[in-house]
Image (cartoon, rainbow, N blue to C red):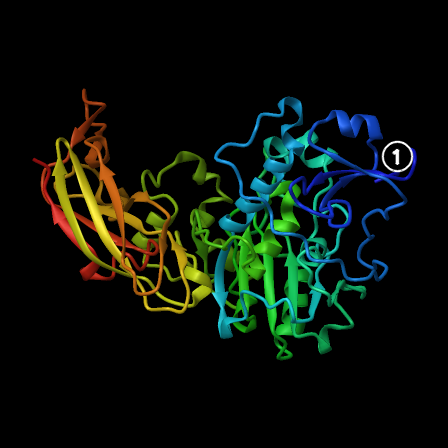
Amino acid sequence: ATRGTGGGFCCWWPQPPAQNICASCVSKDFNFQQASCNAADSGTWCGGDDPAPNPSPNPSPSPAPSPTPSPAPLPERCPDRGNNNYKSSCKLQLAGRIVTESTVVLKNEGEVLPLSKHSSVALIGSQACASDPLAIAGGSGWNGMACQDVHKVNLKDGISKLGVGEVSCPDQSDHGNSKAGNADVIVAVVVPAKASEGSDRSTLQLSSEDTQLIRKYSQAGHKVIVAMNAPGPMITSTWDANVAAIAISWLPGQQDGRGIALALYGEDYEASGRLPFTFPKCSTEQCTQADELASVHLGDKIASGQYLKFEEKALIGYRWYHAQGLQVSYPFGFGLFAYGSATVAYTSVAATFKGDDVEITATLSHSGPRAGRDVPQLYLKFPASIPGDAASKPEWVLKGFTKVLVEPGKPATAGFSLSVRDVSYWDDGPGQSKWVCAQGTFKACVGANARDAILDEAACTTFAPL
């Protein structure tokens, strides 16, 4: 950003009651004048000749910043700032929390996550220290005011603001890092090709450059964490075997690097997201385009245009992978609990009737070292009596999910409510076109994801609507 008159800047976050706001500023604007900043009612003017964000990929070294004070507790509802909502301190803090809590930890070998602030970090990848990181999609995913007028935080800045002193940026032509060999951990920051409205991605894989970069360090025995901003389903099986950890976030906008840093360090909030789709596994390690198309839902129908006819009917996403019996890398709903420090047990699953509704409850427990937020999911198997083509009827359907804090040795309860509509099917027979409450016995299972929930009979129950 270019400097405004006087060499100062307007800091959008943090805001009072935080201390040392100008020294620890995460989101700043050099184009704002002092009067405009003060008039915005959500900015703090910082005078002097504060440096602009470092360039990428070869930023100049700078002294380690002081740790950012813990944010003030978020109110139940952020105050309305009208046209300035997108840069209010409360909304920016909330955005960072959303990024963190929606981040999905797919892998965490050796409990490398959460990272220690005392560990040295070598960043690799073109996005790690980018002055304008790719954190938004195209089309309706782009918002000019929110994501262009407010500086997007890269991961280097996000980590540095946590008080981590030894963080180095890429300094090689392939976006590698000459300091990686001596670092305690390497974090690869990667983003697939930009997704946009009006066009489809040509592949579910990372670029060959990013894949080679990850392999370069992970196959050499380095402790590599991959932090990926994903616009949708991804194929990771071509590079994930030797990495220590994988954290997936979702093109989170302004607070991109701050939220991801909080997730990697378990700072303030916890990475407790779950996959909203399936990550397929390529049929070969090389994974050519033909291999990829043969491994993913509707891949064999793209060239012919048959995918436009919706012949899969209700077998969409995870339902199709289950029906085909295909092994996937990470199933729908997957995400490690408490950074993989424990596995939650789902027991005492029961169904009770409350009027026309069916209430499903389950007990959640674990004996791990730390508390965590689990996302139990309810999958329902309809009676075989439902009419229709057996080849296009899903065996299991997600009917609910919730987020529950589960402490070590302290069982928690998760509850789901099924309405008459939830246990009904759409009858598209001649002269019908209506919802019909299914008759027969339903099977309900509660678990961690679409694959594992239906495997444990102890986590299932049956019921028949009255």
Give above or below for 451 relative to 71.
below
Q: Residue furthest left?
A: 466
Asked if residue 250 can be seen in this view, the reply is no
Seen at 86% across and 48% down, the residue is 51
- Quarter that holds the C terminus: top left
Q: Residue furthest right?
A: 6
Percent coordinates x, y for residue 353 in the rendering: 12, 38
Query: Residue 82 appears in which quarter of the rendering?
Result: top right
Seen at 77% across and 45% down, the residue is 22
Give above or below for 172 relative to 352.
below
Percent coordinates x, y for residue 196 in the rendering: 61, 37
- Quarter that holds the N terminus: top right
Q: Which of these two is toward me, 217 or 344?
A: 344
Percent coordinates x, y for residue 202 in the rendering: 59, 47
Q: Residue furthest top?
A: 431
Seen at 65% across and 70% down, the residue is 118
Residue named by callout 1:
4
Q: Which of these two is toward me, 182 or 10?
A: 10
Task: Check disc 1 and give the amino acid type.
Answer: Gly
Asked if residue 281 can be seen in this view, the reply is yes
Percent coordinates x, y for residue 195 in the rendering: 61, 42
Q: Residues within 10 Å of mark 1 (few under 14, many from 20)?
A: some
Query: Residue 367 appears in which quarter of the rendering?
Result: bottom left
Seen at 35% across and 41% down, the residue is 312
